[in-house]
Every structure is written in structure tokens, then in C-alpha cells.
Image (spheres, helix red, strand yellow):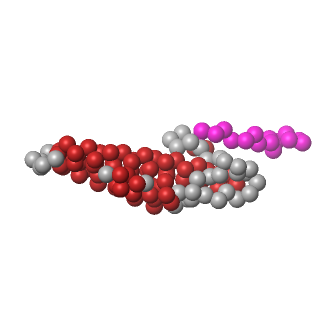
């Protein structure tokens, strides 16, 4: 059981978060690959599905098997959440550094709701 818990968490092992000391003047060095949290997510689903399958069968030591499967699934889920959040912060920092741009929050509609900048009126002299 301890060996399984120690093995869990690709994102914890392979995702480099945005440094706390990043000063917005240099290119951030951090992970942008979604592979580790995607693997964590797949293993979470596999462990959860396996635990549900075992729970519906008549097997010896069912309680131990289901409990250990769900504990391991929780480890994979926590690692996936960590990975996705750190990668999201890194991608936002890279966008900020490269473009001076802060992407809108997911689900807000983005720049669609941003009013256009004031345009000078070409019909008025000096404006």
C-alpha cells in the first residue's frame, strides 16, 4: 500500500511550477505540457472504475481492495488537480511575458464583452 502511494502522482514529480520569485521581466521557466496531469486523470479513472467493479463482485478481501483502490484514486486526482493548476498558471505567465496580455478567465466570453476603444471622430476637425 505504501509503495502504491509513493508511486502516485506524475504531476507532482514531473511538473515544474512557476517560481514564486518570477518578476515578469524574464521568461518564466515552468512546465506547459499537459501530459502528466492527463496521465494522472486517466489513472484516477482507472482506479475509480476498478474499485467500483470490485465493489460489485464477490471477491475475498473486498473492503481492502476497494479502499486501497479509492485511496490511490484520490492520490491520482490530487496530483492531476495540482498539475492542471500549475500548468495553467505557467501558461498565463508565458502569455503575459510574450504578449503583455492577460487571458480572460475561462467561461467569461473573453474579449467579446470588452468595449471598443474610443475612436476619434473623422468628421470633426482636429478629432
- Along the viewing direction, whichever of 77 and 7 lies nearer the viewer: 7
Let me know if residue 95 is in the magenta part. no
Name the residue rendered at 58%, 53% in the picture: 17
Task: Indicate left or right for 84 with 92 as reference.
Answer: left
| Residue, far front | 2
Location of residue 6 in the rendering, given as x and y in whole percent from the top left corner: 40, 54
- Is 108 drawn above or below residue 87 in the view shown? above
Name the residue rendered at 36%, 56% in the picture: 3
Name the residue rendered at 39%, 48% in the picture: 75
- Along the viewing direction, whichever of 99 and 7 lies nearer the viewer: 7
Location of residue 41 in the rendering, given as x and y in whole percent from the top left corner: 38, 53
Task: Indicate left or right for 121 with 5 as reference.
Answer: right
Task: Tell me where the magenta segment starts and ends, as one range.
Answer: 112-127
| Residue, far right | 126
Q: In the rendered image, is residue 122 in sight? A: yes
The rendered magenta stretch, by its main secondary structure, is classed as: loop
**Image quadrant in which the C terminus is located:** top right
Report which quarter residue 38 is drawn in.
bottom left
| Residue, far left | 58
Task: Indicate left or right for 92 with 77 as reference.
Answer: right
- Along the viewing direction, whichever of 52 and 70 lies nearer the viewer: 70
Name the residue rendered at 76%, 42% in the picture: 119
- Along the viewing direction, whichever of 8 and 121 lies nearer the viewer: 8
Q: In the rendered image, is residue 101 in sight? A: no
Location of residue 50 in the rendering, given as x and y in whole percent from the top left corner: 23, 52
Location of residue 107 in the rendering, given as x and y in whole percent from the top left corner: 50, 41
Image label count: 0
Amino acid at each position: 500500500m505504501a509503495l502504491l502511494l509513493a508511486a502516485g502522482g506524475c504531476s507532482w514529480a514531473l511538473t515544474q511550477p512557476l517560481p514564486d520569485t518570477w518578476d515578469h521581466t524574464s521568461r518564466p521557466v515552468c512546465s506547459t505540457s499537459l501530459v502528466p496531469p492527463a496521465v494522472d486523470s486517466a489513472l484516477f479513472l482507472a482506479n475509480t472504475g476498478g474499485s467500483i467493479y470490485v465493489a460489485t463482485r464477490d471477491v475475498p478481501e473486498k473492503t481492502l481492495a476497494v479502499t486501497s483502490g479509492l485511496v490511490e484514486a484520490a492520490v491520482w486526482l490530487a496530483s492531476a488537480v495540482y498539475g492542471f493548476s500549475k500548468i495553467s498558471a505557467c501558461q498565463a505567465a508565458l502569455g503575459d511575458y510574450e504578449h503583455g496580455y492577460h487571458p480572460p478567465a475561462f467561461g467569461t466570453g473573453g474579449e467579446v464583452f470588452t468595449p471598443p476603444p474610443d475612436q476619434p471622430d473623422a468628421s470633426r476637425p482636429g478629432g
